[in-house]
Amino acid sequence: MRAWVVDRPGPIVEGPLVAVERPDPEPGPGEVRIRVRACGVCRTDLHLALGELPPRRPGTVPGHEIVGVVDALGPGAGRFARGDRIGVAWLRGTCGHCRFCRTGRENLCPDAAFTGWDADGGYAELAVVPEAYAYRLPAALHDVAAAPLLCAGIVGYRALRRAELPPGGRLGIYGFGASAHLVAQVAIAQGASVHVLTRSAAARKLAMELGAASARPAQDGPPEPLDSAILFAPAGGLVPVALRALDAGGTLAVAGIYLTDVPKLNYAEELFREKQLRSVTANTRADGEEFLRVAAALGVRPTVDPRPLAEADRALADLDAGRITGAAVLVAD
C-alpha cells in the first residue's frame, strides 16, 4: 500500500513526511482493517512531524481522523461487517482496569494508545484499528465532512464541556482552525454568544459567516467579558490574555496537545475572583459517541479543504504556514 511516514521529525522545509510503499497491514485479534476514503489533517500530525510531539516509534504513519470501509476482519472481530463505513479517532486503546478507566476517565489512562502516534494512522490506503475504538458514522455526513469530526470535533467538544459554558453564555475562542470552527457551530446552535479571537483575517471572516457575535485579533480582546474561553492556538502567550478577558468565575480550557511556554501570571489580574485554568486531554469513547449524535442533530458541518493523498506533505506544509481555513482532508486518489 501507499503511505506517508514521519521519517526524521524536524522543520517542514526539511521534509519530515516521506512517501513510502509498505505491505498491506493485517488485522489482529479484535481488529478490523479499513480501506481509507478520507483522513483529516490535524495539528497534532504537524506537532509530530515537527518533533514538538516526541515520536513513540520510528516511521509512524500519522493521521487519526479516518473514514473508511471495512474490508477485512481479524480473529474474533464481529462488531462490524465487511462493507461497513466506520470512523477511527485519536484514542486507540486503554487498559480498561486502572482507576481512570473504571471511573469514566479513560482519556487519562496511563497506558492509553493513540492512532498515528503509538500505531500507524490514516495517511495511507489501508489502516487497522481495534473494533472497540471505532465509530459508526451518521449516514448524512459524507466521507470528507465526517473526517474532521473524529478529532477536531470530538476533542473540541470535550474542551467545550471542560470550559463549563453556562446556558446562553459568552464564549471566547482563541485560534480558529479545524477544531474551533466546529465548536463554534455547536455553541452558537445551543444559544451562546461566541467571540472569536484570531490573527487570521480569513478565519475571522469564516467565524462571522458561521454566526459568531464578533471576530477580532486576540490582542484586541472581546467586546464583553467572557463566561468561558477555549484556547486552541498552541501559543502559551495567549493564556494570560484569555484569562484577563474572563468575567469573575469564568473558565479557560486549553485544548491543544502542545503549547509553547506560558508567561508568568499576575494573580490579581488573571486568576483572582475564582477564575479557572484547565487543560484538556484527548477524549473518551463516550465523548465521541455523544459528539457525533450532537453534530448530526445540530447540523454541524466542517469547512473542508480536500487534498489528494499524494499531496499529504503539501497539506501539512500549508497547515504549518497558516494557509488552511477550516480543515484539510486527504482523500483517496
Image (spheres, grey):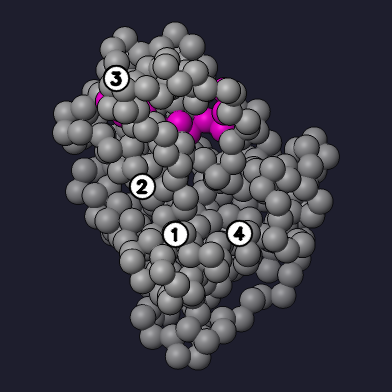
Disc 4 from disc 2: Cα separation: 20 Å
Residue located beneath label 1 in the image: 107
Classed neighbour count for the residue bearing mark 3: other residues with Cα under 10 Å, few (<14), some (14–19), many (≥20):
some
Q: Residues within 10 Å of mark 1 (few under 14, many from 20)?
A: many
Q: Tell me if label 1 and label 4 are in contact, CB under 8 Å.
A: no
Q: Position of residue 65 (x, y in %)?
A: 49, 54
* Front tag of 3 and 4: 3
Callout 2 amino acid: Arg
Residue 247: mark in rendering:
3
Report the disc number at residue 116: 4
- Asked if labels 1 and 3 touch by Cβ distance under 8 angstroms, the answer is no
In the picture, which quadrant includes the C terminus? bottom right
Which of label 3 and label 1 is nearer to you? 3
Residue at figure coordinates x 45%, y 90% from the top left: 76
Please name the amino acid that badge 3 sits on: Asp
C-alpha distance separating marks 3 and 4: 38 Å
Marks 3 and 2, how far apart in space?
Answer: 22 Å
Q: Amino acid at mark 4?
A: Gly
- Judged left or right of residue 149, residue 22 is right
The residue nearer to you, when weighing 239 against 185, is 239
Residue beneath disc 2: 158
Q: Is residue 210 visible?
A: no
273 or 83, which lies in front?
Answer: 273
The residue range painted magenta reads: 226-238
Secondary structure at numbered mark 4: loop
**Residue at x 21%, y 43% (from the top left corner):** 298
Q: Position of residue 210 (x, y in %)?
A: 31, 26
Q: Are marks 2 and 1 in contact (CB under 8 Å)?
A: yes
